[in-house]
Amino acid sequence: MSLSTHVLNAVTGTPAVAVDVTLTDAHGAVLASGRTDDDGRIDSLGGELGEGCYRISFDTGSYFAADGITTFYPEVTVAFEIRDAAAHHHVPLLLSPYSYSTYRGS
C-alpha cells in the first residue's frame, strides 16, 4: 500500500508548495515526514503501510506565515483508516486560511 497527498491553496487555486507533512500511527509514533513539492504533492509517504488507523498532519501555520497570512488553523490533522493494505491511498487537502476540506482521493 502506498500513501500520497496533494495540497491545494483554495484561495489562489495553486499548489501549496513547501507544506511540511507528518504521518503518524494510531499511537502517535512518527512514521514519515516530507514536504510538498512544486506541484503541492508528496507522491510517497511512509512506504508500505498495513491495515490500521493513521494520521497525516499538515503544518499549515508555517505555510501561511511564510506569506504573512494569518490562519485560524495552524495545523490540519486528518485521521483515516486503511482497510485494504494492497490499495493505494491518496489524502488530498484543500486549504484556505479559515477553512479546509479533505476527501478520499484516487
Image (cartoon, helix red, strand yellow):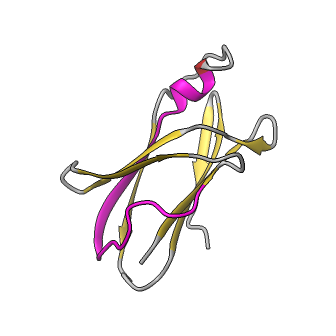
In the figure, residue 64 lies in which quadrant? top right
Q: In which quarter of the image is the C terminus?
A: bottom right
Residue 99 point in image, percent of width and height? 62, 35
| 101 sits left or right of 44 in the view | right
Q: Does the magenta stretch include residue 82?
A: no
User: Which of 76/15 is in front?
Assistant: 15
Q: Is residue 36 above or below residue 105?
A: above
Q: Quadrant of the N terminus?
A: bottom left
User: Which of 97/87 is in front?
Assistant: 87
Residue 55 point in image, percent of width and height? 36, 53
User: Which of 92/63 is in front?
Assistant: 63
Residue furthest to the left = 27
| 9 sits left or right of 71 in the view | right
Residue 69 point in image, percent of width and height? 66, 17
Q: For the point 66% across and 13% down, which residue is it?
A: 68
| 95 sits left or right of 46 in the view | right
In the figure, residue 104 lies in which quadrant? bottom right
Q: In this view, does 61 lie above or below 88?
A: above
Residue 7 point in image, percent of width and height? 63, 48
Q: For the point 62% across and 28% down, which residue is it?
A: 98
Report the number of numbered marks.
Answer: 0
User: Which of 2/9 is in front?
Assistant: 2
Q: For the point 46% across and 47% down, which residue is it?
A: 34
Q: Which segment did they paint magenta?
A: 42-64
Q: Does the magenta stretch include residue 54?
A: yes
Q: For the point 59% across and 29% down, which residue is it?
A: 63
Residue furthest to the right = 13
